Image (cartoon, grey):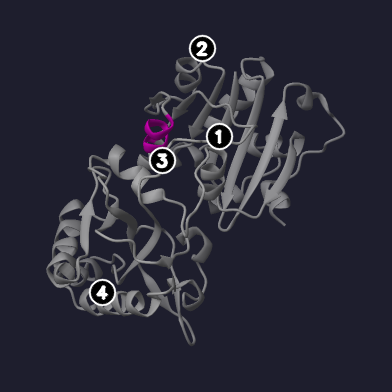
Amino acid sequence: MKLTVDCILTSQLSALPHDSALAYLLSKANREWLDLPLEALLCNQHGLKPELDYPLAVIAVGADGLNAGDAYWLRADPVHLTMQRDSFSLSDPVPVPMRGEHAEHLVASLNQHFGQDGLTFVIGRSGAWYLRLNQAPQIKTDLPSVAVGKGIYQFMPQGATSAKWRAFLNEAQMLLHDHPVNMVRESAGEVAVNSIWLSGGGVMPLRAGLHRDIHNDVDLIIADHPFYRGLAQWSGFPSQAIAVNPAAILQNAASYRHVRLQWPSEQSLSEMGFHVLLNALKANKIKALTLNLGCYEKTLTATITRLDTFKFWRKLKPVMHFLA
């Protein structure tokens, strides 16, 4: 079995020492930095090309309990903007985690305010927020992973109707500023949801004439994220939910040729999961392992085989060494 693992490179992972399993894998692997966010890389490998945006939202909505229909969909992540010296920056994490009742109250207020403009905000089964439009907005957006920690001005919507959409976002920020939900959140020491981040817009793309990356022969996706599950539905191949035990993930996928795994965040913070991958590689249960580590606007791709583990001259180094 070949295994491709997609993982967000968190600060905890970046700080792992040279004797960690992830550091071992990176030290022995053939590595390449790609000038693409992880989500964009995933789209390209599965034959999803951008019109203006990569159509992330519409691919996800069906797997998130919603009906995509013929509408145009955008992700509408609730976010927190931080005031810097002379501009606002986008704070991590995106989206801001919150309780379900808080999300419902905020979305209800947004719909009441923007309903007459043809904007409908919807919450998916996963808790993700989406914006449904009857017509394409003629804007290009940026993924939040590209903008996190940076001044937001250069990442605002671009295109023929960008002025209108920037005005919408300003209205949303004013609406959210004094919202009762944010008053409650701030009194409890939680960050306020003071803006919306739009990205990943599009209508459902046709599968006709689909050309996937020639290196991507995936025949099973294991994931909980609605975009991954939706991608499997759109591509027409099976998917599985993520097992709690990392070893069970590999056992459940053993009969497939090439598996793509969305590495769950609770396991990416633990060394146990990477030890399981390393041990399976050494035992020849995995023929080739590819790690796609998303690092903001770039992706570090590391490919390793069992033979690579015998290359003693590739000295072990901490994870941070490979991010310089």
Mark 1 residue type: Val
Q: Earlier in the sequence, mark 4 or mark 1?
A: 1
Circle on res. 206:
3
Residues under labels 4 and 3: Cα distance? Answer: 33 Å
Label 4 packing within 10 angstroms: few (<14), some (14-19), many (20+): some
Label 1 packing within 10 angstroms: few (<14), some (14-19), many (20+): some
Residues under labels 2 and 4: Cα distance? Answer: 49 Å
Which sits in the foreground, 173 or 96?
A: 173
**x, y percent for residue 265:** 44, 42
Residue 204 vs 151, above or below: the answer is above
| Residue located farthest toward the front when viewing the structure as drawn | 209
Q: Earlier in the sequence, mark 2 or mark 3?
A: 3
Q: Earlier in the sequence, mark 2 or mark 1?
A: 1
Circle on res. 141:
none
| Residue located farthest toward the bottom when viewing the structure as drawn | 86
Residue 7 colored in magenta in the image: no
Question: At 43% across and 25% down in the image, what residue appears?
Answer: 237
Residue 232 colored in magenta in the image: yes
